[in-house]
Every structure is written in structure tokens, then in C-alpha cells.
Amino acid sequence: CCTAPVAPSTLTGAPAQSAPAAEGPVAALIDHTLLKPDATDEQIGQLCAEAREHGFATVCVNPYRVALAARLLAGSQVKVCTVVGFPLGATFTEVKVLETDIAIRCGAREIDMVLNIGALKSGDLDRVKQDIAAVVAEAHASGVAVKVILETALLTDKEKAVASALAVLAGADFVKTSTGFAAHGATEADVSLLRLAAGPGTGVKASGGIRTREDLDRMRQAGASRIGTSSGVQIVSGGNR
């Protein structure tokens, strides 16, 4: 249950903003991420403190943690991002919309939703588009951006291109490579493909396996305008582990 609802007066209803420019400061590209199921309150607190210190774009946490993160980041420029239909994308559209609504009321300002992967691979493209559009409509009514997770490790190149096009048609702000829970995360080839398929007006988020500044730079050069990583501090501090 959400214990830190956002007052209606803080919800602008404005269209969600697209990705930051790829040439911008590195920290501003990073969604500082902790989605492990066993994450503790203390670890979420550390995540938020690091995000404040370094000026990351968001912290990305599981829905249960949104209210805590929103309290800890109040007054900062760091937004709270959460995941919907995660990590399989196979829940009912109505459930994804409800998750989105609750997350926004708890303080989420960006939503990373998993598309219906099985429907995509079955060729049910209308269902995929409607699933995305329903979440986008719910989020955009409150000025909240939506990133659509394609889970590229499970898709053919054709399916990646089709999924990207459907996300754009449904009004999504970003397409995103991965949940981080599949066989592999972002690749430069996938980021390039998503950038081409989504076009210049839609952000591309690379996530999964990005641990160093070199990794980030390769993804940015391939076309990523946002980076999801649990190694944000290491990246901005110049670590290479």
C-alpha cells in the first residue's frame, strides 16, 4: 500500500518529456537501478543518497519501494522510476494500468513497462499496441514518461523493429532493451537497431550489463539516450571493475 501519495496539485498533466541529449553530462543519462527482490530499506536509502550526490536522472526501484524513494528524494531533481508488468510482461493490461496509477500516486515520475512479449511473438500486434497505449494514457495524464521494455534477448531483429514501431505508435517516450533478468542485456547492435526503428523523436534506454564508463560510451555512441545500470557510482567515478 502506498504511504506517500503525491498531491494532485503536483501532477501537471503535461506531455512527458523525451530523453536527455546524448551528449549531456554522463550522470544525467543514468537511471540508478536496484531491482533485486531482496533489496532492503537500507540499500534503497543508499541508492537514493548516491543519486542525490551524483545527480542521476532517476532511481529505478520496484513498485513497493516507490513511496520510500520518493520521500528520500523529496526536494531533489532526481526522479523516481519504477517497473510495471515486470519482469515478464504477461499480466493483464488492466493490471499494468492499475500498477501505473498506484505507482504515480506513490511518487513515480517515470514508468518502465514490459510489453506483452508472448503476444508480440504470436503476431498479435494490436494487443501489444493496446497494452502499451493503455499504460501510456494513464501515465501521460499525470505528465509521467513511459519506457517500453522489449526484452531484446528474447526477440529476433524483425521483432525488435516491430516492437519499437508499435511503442512509438502507442505514444511511448522511450524504448528500452532489457529487464536485466533475461539471458543477456543491452548490446550495441540492439541499441543501434532500436534507435533506427524508433526514430529521432523517441528515447532509447540501454540496460543490462552496463558496468563501466566504456560500456556507457559505447551504448551512447550506438544511440542510447538513457542508461539503466546498478553501477552508476562506479561509472561516474571512473571505476573499471
Image: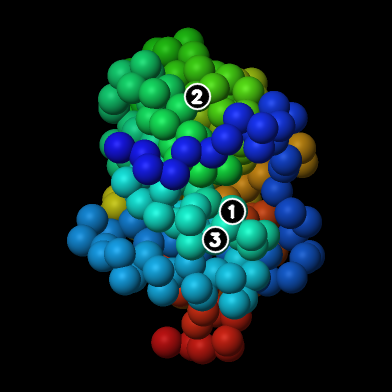
Circle 2 residues within 10 Å: few <14, some 14–19, many ≥20: many
Q: Give 192 or 214, whichever is nearer the viewer.
A: 214
Q: Is residue 159 left or right of residue 197?
A: left
Q: Which residue is mark 2?
A: 135
Q: Which residue is mark 3?
A: 73
Q: Which is nearer the eye, 138 or 106?
A: 106
Residue under label 1, please give it. 79
- The picture places residue 151, in percent across and down from the top left corner, at 40, 43
Tell me the quarter of the image containing the C terminus: bottom left
| Residue depicted at x 64% and y 62% | 76
From the viewer's perspective, is 66 left or right of 16?
left
Query: What residue sits 36% from the left and 51% below the top?
Result: 65
Tag 3: Cα neighbours inside 10 Å, few (<14), some, or many (≥20)? Answer: many
Q: Identify whether 14 is placed above or below 131.
A: below
**Residue type at mark 2?**
Val
Compare marks 1 and 2 and give the one earlier in the sequence.
1
Find residue 136 and report its horizontal and vertical position in percent. Answer: 56, 25
Relative side of 57 to 15, left or right: left
Q: Residue at x 66, y 37 (%)?
A: 10
